Amino acid sequence: MTTRQYVLPVDQTQWELTTGSTVVFNWDYDPQRSDLLRLYEKGKDLQWNTSQRLDWAQDVDPQNPLSLADEVTPFYGTPVWAQMDDKGHAEIKRHLAAWQFSQFLHGEQGALVCTARIVECVPLLDAKFYAATQVMDEARHVETYSRFLREKIGFAYPINPHLKTLLNQVLSDGRWDMIYLGMQILIEGLALAAFNITRDLAQNPLVRALNAYVMQDEARHVAFGRMALRAYYPQLSEREREEREEFVVESSYLMRERFLGEEVWQHLGFGNEDCKRYVFESLMMREYRRMLFSRIVPLIKDIGLWGGRVRKAYEDMGVLMFEHLDPETQSVADEQIALQIDAARQAGSGALQTAASV
């Protein structure tokens, strides 16, 4: 079973994008940014092998791959849900899990391509060093989510149109800081929040560990973007700052529409407009969309793109309260949870070995 078994054929959904980027060579090999070099050292130390760190032998329920309660299913409590039996409920959960992890997979491939672009165009050699470690991280994430879809679910969904639009915008812009802003802050920030929700709600240990380990890497990626942009954005003119704030606002509204999952109910043959309304208005999805910005809002404030238009947009979206969260505290918590999962697994393996020896 491979992820070539998409709900739509790959040759109908893949796309090519021609970009014009500036490649920067830097012949100054003396260290310049100690903070970037420390992050580079950390990135080297924390590389991991998905085939070894994750226990792929763990079972995943094909009827409920993420082991989620009914109450956190977007259709729960709707007329669509009430008319279906347990088999129908399981089919919805299976397709929603495939759709969600497919978007994680496609987003990680976007991050892989964007980070490779950063290696090309970022001016400081120290930043190129760190970005090179992130390229490896993103390749590992693509490998990991692809393997989960292939081995544990068995099929995948194409890239969501809203995510595709955002990736097109990021990759079409030749300015290095716009790639940082689009990928390291907006797309990675949204992904961190989505991984966070899945990690904390999923009851399956493989799903929980997989997302926790990816988040441990993503914490470094977001720190990389913060360091670079906080140093660069004070140098911008008012017009340049306004252009970037406009991009933040447009991208935030676009991303808010990303996780409605229209492709799922279209594929399952449900009424599109009714389902869209059910999902958009459901209490669970309103809270889910709100929490997706728990990482982006404090990041945008932290890098200094906090003009009136941005604040007004986040107030309109009902997420302005996240401005008081500390990105560094969030990152430390993500890293600690990954280490706790490692420790629990090692303790479990030790107990099994002791029992076997007795």
Image: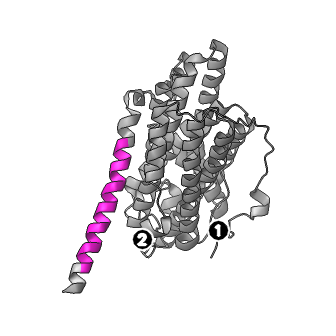
87 vs 206, nearest the viewer? 206
- In the rendered structure, does residue 183 fall within the stretch colored magenta? no
What's the colour scheme? one colour
Q: Main secondary structure of the magenta part?
A: helix
Image quarter where the N terminus lies is bottom right
Q: Which residues are magenta?
A: 332-353
Residue 87, given in percent of the width and then of the height, sits at 50, 73
Displayed quadrant of residue 55: bottom left
Q: Amino acid at mark 1?
A: Thr
Front residue of 298/21: it is 21
Residue beneath the point at 42% across and 65% down: 53
Q: Name the residue beneath numbered marker 1.
A: 3
Q: Is residue 110 above or below residue 202?
A: above
Is 256 rendered above or below residue 264? above
Crowd tier of the residue under label 1, counting other residues whose Cα lies within 10 Å: few below 14, some 14–19, many 20 or above: some
Q: Residue 353 is drawn in which quadrant? A: bottom left
For residue 256, above or below residue 213: above
Q: Amino acid at mark 2?
A: Asp
Query: Where does residue 115 sit, x and y in percent of width and height?
Result: 62, 44
> In this orientation, does residue 204 appear?
no
Q: Is residue 348 magenta?
A: yes
Outermost residue toward the left in this view: 358
Residue displayed at 55% across by 33% down: 30
Q: Pointer 2: what residue?
A: 55
Q: Position of residue 227 (x, y in %)?
A: 50, 31
Q: CA distance from mark 1 to mark 2?
A: 20 Å
- Residue found farthest to the top: 238
